Image (tube, rainbow, N blue to C red):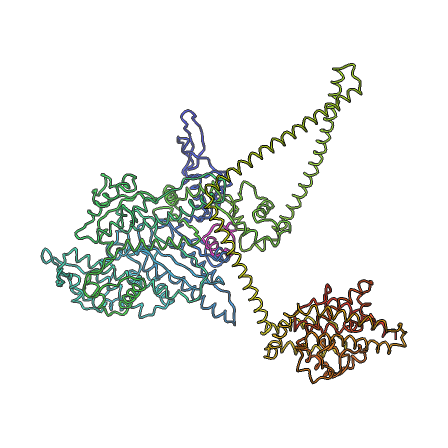
Amino acid sequence: VVGEVLHHDHDRDMLQVQLVANDGSGKQTANFHASVAKPVNPSNLDGVEDNTQLMHLHEPSLLHNLRFRYAKDLIYTYTGYIMIAINPYKALTCYGQQTMKAYQGKSIGVLPPHLYAMADRAFRSMKVDGTSQSIMISGESGSGKTESSKIVMKYLAMCGTPPDRTGTEERRASDQLNSLSEKVLGCNPILEAYGNAKTVMNNNSSRFGKFTRIHFDRRNWLVGADVVTYLLEKSRTVTQSTNERNYHCFYQAFAGLSAAEKKSLRLTRPEDYALLRSGVVQVSGINDCDRYNEVVLAMRTIGITVEQQQGIIVILAAILHLGNVHFDETHADACQISDSAVTEATSELLQLPAVALEEALTMRTMKSMSKSVYKIPLKVHEACYSRDSLAKAIYGKLFDWLVARVNESLLTQTETRAFIGVLDIFGFEEFKVNSFEQLCINFANERLQAHFNSSVFRQEQEIYIREAIIWEPIEEPDNQACISMLANRSGKPAGLFALLDEQCRLPKCTHKTFVEKLFAEHTEALAQSTLAKPTKAGRLASNEGFVIKHYAGQVEYFAEGFLQKNNNSLHADLELVLQSAEQPILKSVLQSQISSAKDTGKRPADRAGQQSRFSSVSSAFVVQLNQLHSSLQATNSHFVRCINPNTTKTADSFVGGHVLHQLRCSGMMEALRLMHAGFPTRCPYEALYDRYKDVMPRAVAALDSPSFCEILLMALGLNKADYQLGITKVFFRAGKLAFLDELTGSEYKELAPDIANKVRVWLIKKRWRRHTIAVVAMLRLTRFLEDLRRLRQFYHASYFLMLMANRPKLTVRRAREIRRRNNAIMIQKNGRRLVELNRVHRKLWAAFLLQRVQRGYLTRKQHGGRLAEIRARRKAAEETRRLAQLEEEKARQREETERIKQMARSNTGANGASAGARYSSKSRPRKEGVSGQLAAADEADMSSSTTVILSEAMEKRLKKLEEQVNELPELRDRVKKLESELEEAKRQLNEQRPPRADATDAPRSRARSQSTAAVTQAALQAAAREAGGRARRSSMGGMPGTKGGWGFLDLLGITAGQTPATPSGVAVPSSSNTSSKKPSNQSSQRAAMMQPPADALLVLSKAVIGIDEHFAKGAATGKSLEQIGNDETNKDIAVLVRGQLCTALSRVLLHGFKSHKFIGRYHIWDFVQQACDATNARVQKAGSLS
């Protein structure tokens, strides 16, 4: 209640407050203690969308904000990343297809709080991170969990629907997925009809828990779903409270079936059946006929045929007839069925023998120690228990079969990327009489509350500690004591459920012995008030019930019926009766149960008449909860806390005490305090860095991710008090969720340019401030240095004046001498001090060295043997490691050699050669008229190189070439000798050459160049015969002029316009001769050059030496490349320089040796390109002049 403080009594710390009633009835004055009254928030904070934005955060402010919003039909409110949803108990207009489209892809905080926003946040997290998500919808009965889960599932089905694409294969896939989304939504009416019922708190209460997992593929399309159910309340099938109903399906059958169908099933009115008579039949606001039609349509959607639907109705009718079976006591230990017509109707519907059913209900088969079989009659209450057990078993098996059919229709074979799970499970319950079902339900809420505490409190604080965040610790609510007391099975004392299973197995045990055993085992829980005995003022005796202190409050349980409800197995006679049923759907239900039992590793019931193995409801439920907890731990959880505003299920009624109790029980108050005091929102550095580094200035993008994020937040104007920088993440205060969601949302690409502009502006301002600060600092430093200089001058002047004042007869000259003497004394003193310190330090270091040597000597003397062993082991290990590395290096070299050989023999080498040929063909200049033919030849080589396989002859040539490479060291001496002979020959030729003639003597110059080339060629051939006579080609024997091996120009394919039979080494042809070459000559020469001779390496080595010498002479005289190419002293080299070297030498180098740097420091292509460009320019210039 909101009020105004009228007076504050400081002595007693009491307040006189004028209260304003919420219902508008008027104002009242009351006195309160100051600790009860809390400060009110400003009016502009009334109705905030996030409770963490409240200035004063306490229970009254939270409750007032929820009340304010609920009065305006704003039922959804954020509390950090937790949503509070209050049941409006009326239809609202904030749902629909248009609203869902509006929330799709929007960050939290952009639009008002809604379940669509939470579902979209989970979907976007799955889409961005690729991790599975879970949405936990919790709350007490009547808070709207079921409706909230349907809203979330409908939104997720819309998000997972693929876009429409007509005329493609994806269109067909889109139609299939649309049908799947309809099935996902269509399964809700079936599960509600067979799993929901009216309770005191809720007209459509889920009497089972379900975890619906919606699966998505890599395209984020909905490709399947499955449903996991937990603890169906089967006892509701046979008994209900006064203001409650059985499951909806029974009443829907009466409302939806025609009169003829009812007559065939022998059905009359709901009031005529014991299973429906104890509760109410009609519920306001629920049309059972319309619901029946929805269920029929949903069954048709998931693939349940009409015959199967009729079979399901038959089973429901049989259960109703079975509930009308009554027993009369014949004598003290036996009974009989009152009306056999009822059992006949049940037997007729289930298609099983009526006599067998009557006998199974009234008698039980037993086996003695001697293995003799006999039957004993049952008492009336035992027969009633058998009847109810059979009815519950049939309904439970039918429900499991329906869930299995739903999963079969929803599952898909498509590979899934992740799933989003929607958990809709029963809330905390407390009635006047609480039994075994309420204990299991409240235990499930304890486990879910522990997961909530772990996610919100423990993990939150552990993250703060790990990330070095400064925060104020908050005490975490702990309910582990209650969970251990209920579910402990491994240690001592055994938990309540373990003791219950033990009592169920032992003979002649009752609920009283179970309660006594529970109190005897859990003395520590009694001392801690986790477990307590019923109060003396209550209706129960000390051995008839117990009290458990749950997280949500204390609950008193009535232990009668615990043992029977925990027993999930039928005795052998009833099992045999069910197995003998011929009803098709019932047979299918039983067969599916046997198959599922085999799949899960459970042993099916024995058909030989033996007593079936005991099956515990509590143990199976605990296992399911453990699996659910593991699934939730593996996902990213989102929490929705549903609140029931009143107990009368009326709209526009907000009972503050009831709502506050639910908020306290759900742990929202502690979570709110934690979020307000801590940093509930966080984001990894790398997420922001990866998103925005490409659009940021280079100076910012080059920073590490923490500095980058700090600059980004500072540039966006975020207050430093609103965030802290951790080790791997940046943490935000409460209320900054929308800011972070906007930064990390899916629309960040649209916001990136604006953010980058803000960062640039911030950088400019920062640089300006930095330069301003630097200028100011420089001015201050200048002034400081000037002040120091003046102070020094003042000091010297003061000293001089003081000296003159103390010694009046002292002259200025003498004063200066005294000053110099004092300065010299000071310098000497400091020098002697440094010398002495140096001497002391040397002595100390000498002492330290002696001590260290002495200690080392003593240690070696004491542990010398062990140290020697250690050194030897280390040395051996080092030697072993060195040898291993050496062997690895040798093996690597061998592998590399084999790889190169393999490349030479495989298509890879051919492709590489072709690539080199392509490169050379692009790099070298070609003459007009020839370029097209050479390009065609290149293309032919490239096309043929993809399938080149070396022949055996080529293999032999490669081997011979490798042998000659190995002989190179021996040939170097011979090469030097041949070089000297070659130089002598060149010198003699130069001496015999006459002086240079003019242009009219060009023919004679060409003749002399031919003679020079012939002599050079003869020398090279002689060298080749002397060094490599063994490697001559037999394939070249038919060519004239090749008796002694190939010459240098022959090897390079330069024939100077001659036929292939003409000897090599002739003059360079003119441009007319070059242009008049025939294509056949070119192609034959090109084909001949594809196979180099065996002595190619030796000849090329000689050529390289000659070219190097030629370049060295040209460089010594300062000649350019063109002048080197026009050198008259060596026409062979001139031939190479003038354009033929690129085509000829590249064939040998690329195909033979794969080397591009045979000419010393000059790269072959650079040299040839420049030389050819210069030659072409000179030729074109000469042509234009002529």
Q: Position of residue 19 (x, y in %)?
A: 42, 34
Looking at this view, is 609 or 31 the one in front?
609
- Left or right of 453 on screen, residue 1032: right
- Left or right of 937 on screen, residue 290: left
Q: Is residue 363 visible?
A: no
Location of residue 246 (image quadrant): bottom left
Looking at this view, is 1029 or 1130 the one in front?
1029
Q: How many marks?
A: 0
Looking at this view, is 1053 or 893 the one in front?
893
Looking at this view, is 1147 or 279 the one in front?
1147
Query: Magenta segment: does it hold 1016?
Result: no
- Left or right of 119 on screen, residue 289: left
Relative to 110, does residue 355 appear above or below in the rendering? below
Query: Magenta segment: does it hold 108?
Result: yes
The quadrant in which the C terminus is found is bottom right
Relative to 239, does residue 1045 appear above or below in the rendering? below
Q: Is residue 1043 visible?
A: yes
Q: Position of residue 721 (x, y in %)?
A: 54, 40
Q: Position of residue 651 (x, y in %)?
A: 39, 49
- Left or right of 1119 on screen, residue 468: left
Location of residue 946 (image quadrant): bottom right
Question: Residue reaching furthest bottom?
Answer: 1038
The quadrant in which the N terminus is found is top left
Q: Position of residue 726 (x, y in %)?
A: 52, 45
Relative to 404, does residue 930 appear above or below in the rendering? below
Q: Which residues are magenta?
A: 102-124
